[in-house]
Amino acid sequence: MNARKTPDQPNSGQPLAEQPSPGELSPRSREQTLQRLGQQHYDIVVVGGGVTGCGIALDAATRGLSVALVEMRDYASGTSSRSGKLIHGGLRYLEQLNFSLVKEALTERALMLRTLCPHLVRPVRFIYPLEHRVWERFYLGSGLVLYDTMGGAGAVPRHRHLTKRGALRLAPALKPEELVGALTFYDAAIDDARHTMTLARTAAAYGADVASGTKVTGFLREGQRVTGVKVHDAISDREIPVVGKQVINAAGVWTDQIQDMVGGRGKFQVRASKGVHILVPRDRIHSDAAILVRAEDSVVFIRPWGRHWLIGTTDTKWELDLDHPAANRDDIDYLLRQVNRVISPELSREDVEGVYAGLRPLLAGESATTSRLSREHAVESPVPGLTVIAGGKYTTYRVMAKDAVDAAARGLDGAAPESCTQNIPLLGAAGYQALWNSRQRLADEYGLHVARIEHLLQRYGSLVTEVLALVKDRPDLGEPLEGAEEYLRVEISYAASHEGALFLDDALTRRTHVSFETMDRGLTAAAPAAALMAEVLGWDDATTKAQIEHYQQRIEAERASQEEMDDAGADAVRKKVRDSRL
Ligand code: FAD
C-alpha cells in the first residue's frame, strides 16, 4: 500500500505562500491530478463522484490507501444533488418494521450533526397532522418513541403531541378541517450538493486524487482481472489510463452501464425511479415547522430551504435518458394537489420558483412498484479487481463507503486498517462552532451583515475565512450577485478557484443553487457569474459567451419539458440540450 499525505502534511518543497489550501480543487491542482492519474498505480480507483463515490474516496484515503476518483461530469451532478436533502431514519421504514435500517440511519444522522459536518446539516422540526383521533395518535406516537430512542440521545429534540389548536398555532397554513391534532418530531436537513463536494475536497486533503470531467470509457484488463479504467478528460480531450489494484463502481443509476463495459452481469441490477421536487417562496406557506403530508401512495415533505419551501417528492419509474431526468407537468401538478389538500391558501403553478428531478438508484427487487424496491445497498465483486456498490440512501453513504472499501480491500496485498471515517470531520467542521459564536465580530470585521455571515458559515463552515480573505483583497467580491442577491459574488469566484466548478452550470446549480432558487432560474445571474468564473479559469470571450448560451439553453429546455404532459414528451425536449462534458 502506498503511503499518502494527510491534511497536516502538505506537499513538501513548495513555498508556503503558494501552498494550496487543504483539498483545494483549483485549475492548477486539477492539472497536477490528471498527470498523476496517468502515472501512479493506485490501491483503489473509484468510478463516480456522487456521495457514495466521494465517501469511498475519503474512507480509502483515511485508511492510508492510495486512491483515485473519476467523475464524468461534476461532483454530485447525478442523484446526489437532486435528493430530498433529508438526513433521516425514514418513518416509512419504521412502518415496514425495518428497524435495523432506521437505527443505522439515525446513528449516521447523529454523527453528521455532531461531528462530521455540523455546518452542512441542521435539525428540522416536522409537524405530522393527524386525521384520526385515537388509533393514529397511538400508532404514530409509539413509532416516534422508537425513533427518538434509536436516534442517539440528544442529537435532536424529542417528539411531542399537539392538540388541534396547538397544531394550528405552529402551522397556521394547515386547513383546520383536515386535522384533529398533530405530532411534532425532528429530522435533519442537508445541502446535498455542497456536502458531496466537501467530501471530495476532504478526500483530496487526505491525499486522494479526485477529478471531475473525467469519464470512464472502458476498463484495463489482464486476462479476466480488472486492472484499471480508461478515462476521457472532457476539458483537454485526452485519454488517460488509470491503473489500480481494485476498481470500485459507484456510478449510481449508471451502474449497469459500467458493468456492461466489463461484460457479463452481476448479481443485481439497478433501476431508476424518478423523484421531482418544487420550490415555492417562503411567504406562500405560513408555518413555523416543516409539514409531512400523507400522499396517495407515499408521503410529501414541505420543508424550509433558505427563503423557500422545498416540496417533494414523486416516485415513478424512469426508463429514459439517465443523464438528464426531466420533470413534466403532471409531476408538478401531483405535488401541488397533495399540498393543496392540507394547506390554505392553496398554491398554483405561478408560485413555483424552481423544479428539479432526480433518479433513485434502486436495487432491482421482486415487486413491480418502485416505491417498494429496497433502499438498502448491496456490494459484490463480479470479476477479480472490481467491486460494485449500489442502492442505499444519502443518509447512509458512510456505511456504504465502508462496506465497499472493506470488500475491495480483500483484494489488496496487505490488510487494510479499519474504516475510521466516524472520526474524520469534513473540511469546514473544525472550528465551525467557535466561528458561529463569533459571527457578529466577523460581520463587523468584513463590513457584512450578520445574516450574510450566517449564510456563509452554513455553507463553508470554518473555510469561511478563505472566502472572506478573497473579499478583503477584492471588496467588489463582497457585493451580492446580480440576479441572485441571496449569494455574494465571491461565492462564484471561490467555486471556481477552490471547489472544482469547471462550468457555469456547476457554479449556478450545485455550488450555489441559483438555478432552482430564483424565479428566472438564474438567467440574469448567468452573465455576471460567467464573468467571475472567466477571471479564475482563464476563459476567453468566446468561451464565456458559449457558457452563458449553453446555460440559457439548458434552462429553456427544462422549462419547456415541464410543460409536457408525460415523461416521453419531457424527455424528448430536455435531452436536446446535453451536458457538454458527456
Ligand atoms: P450518484 O449521485 O448518481 O453518483 C453517481 C455518479 O457516477 C454520478 O455523478 C455520475 O456522473 C457518475 N458516473 C456515471 N457514469 C460514469 C462514468 N462512465 N465515468 C465517471 N463517472 C460516472 N436519500 C436520503 O438519505 N435522504 C433523502 O431525503 C433522499 N431523497 C431522495 C429524493 C430523490 C428524488 C432521489 C432521487 C433520491 C433521494 N435519496 C435520498 C437517495 C439519495 O439521493 C441517493 O441514494 C444518493 O444520492 C445516491 O448517490 P450515488 O453516489 O450512489 O449516485
Image: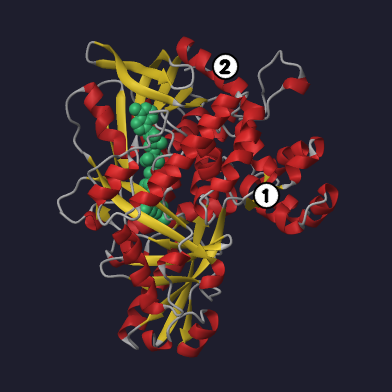
| Residue plotted at (54% across, 84% down) | 169
Residue 356 in view of the camera: yes
| Residue plotted at (43% across, 31% down) | 73
Distance CA(mark 1)–CA(mark 2): 29 Å
Residue 536 figure quarter: top right
Q: Amino acid at mark 1?
A: Leu
* Horizontal relation, residue 121 to residue 137: left or right: right
Q: Considering depth in this image, is 22 or 352 the residue closer to the camera?
A: 352
* Horizontal relation, residue 55 to residue 493: left or right: left
In the rendering, at what x and y percent does residue 329 appear? Answer: 32, 59
In the displayed structure, would residue 355 be above or below residue 512?
below
Circle nearer the N terminus (1, 2): 2
Residue 451 figure quarter: bottom right
Image quarter where ligand 1 lies: top left
- Which numbered circle lies on residue 32? 2
Q: Amino acid at mark 2?
A: Gln
List the single residue furthest toward the right: 445
In the rendering, at what x and y percent does residue 79 appear? Answer: 39, 44
**Residue at mark 1:** 456
| Residue plotted at (77% across, 21% down) | 16
| Residue plotted at (60% across, 26% down) | 541
Residue 14 figure quarter: top right
- Mark 1 lies on a secondary structure that is helix
In the rendering, at what x and y percent does residue 351 appear? Answer: 47, 66
Q: Considering depth in this image, is 9 or 526 the residue closer to the camera?
A: 526
